[in-house]
Image (spheres, rainbow, N blue to C red):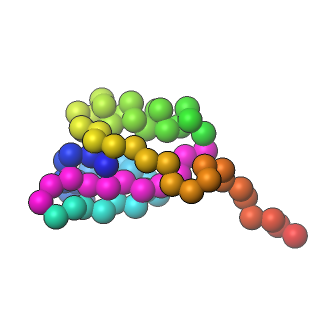
Amino acid sequence: MVRETLVPETTAWFGDLTITPLEGSGTVLTGTFPDQSALRGFLTQLWNLNFTVLSVEKVGNGFHQEPDPG
């Protein structure tokens, strides 16, 4: 969750993340990352863009598995 309320012009950078504005202020960003380094890079980008990260939560078991092709 970030403190800022995101406007549509800023959301293209977030790719496949789900963006949920909160009533009042703040935005919840929900998505998956392939590994911790990808998450770290994303958090660094938020920092570089002067977003205030309020919280980061792990949801689910933390393992992403590709669907079985067979």
- Examine the structure image and report whether residue 37 is included in the region drawn in magenta: no
Q: Place residue 56 in its image quadrant.
A: top left
Q: Position of residue 65 (x, y in %)?
A: 71, 56
Residue 12 appears in the picture as rendered = no
Seen from the viewer's position, the closer of residues 38 and 10 is 38
In which quadrant of the rendered image does the C terminus lie?
Answer: bottom right
Number of numbered discs visible in the structure rendering: 0
Seen from the viewer's position, the closer of residues 25 and 13 is 25
- Examine the structure image and report whether residue 31 is included in the region drawn in magenta: yes
Above/below status of 40 relative to 20: above
Seen from the viewer's position, the closer of residues 30 and 8 is 30
**Farthest residue toward the bottom?**
70
Q: Position of residue 17 (x, y in %)?
A: 43, 56
Residue found at x 24% / y 38%: 52
Left or right of residue 69, residue 55 in this image: left
**Farthest residue toward the right?**
70
Residue found at x 60% / y 49%: 62
Tell me which secondary structure the magenta stretch mostly adopts: loop
Residue found at x 39% / y 35%: 43
Q: Position of residue 46 (x, y in %)?
A: 33, 37
Residue 52 appears in the picture as rendered = yes
| Range shown magenta | 24-34
**Farthest residue toward the left?**
24
Residue found at x 19% / y 47%: 4
Q: Position of residue 27 (x, y in %)?
A: 26, 55
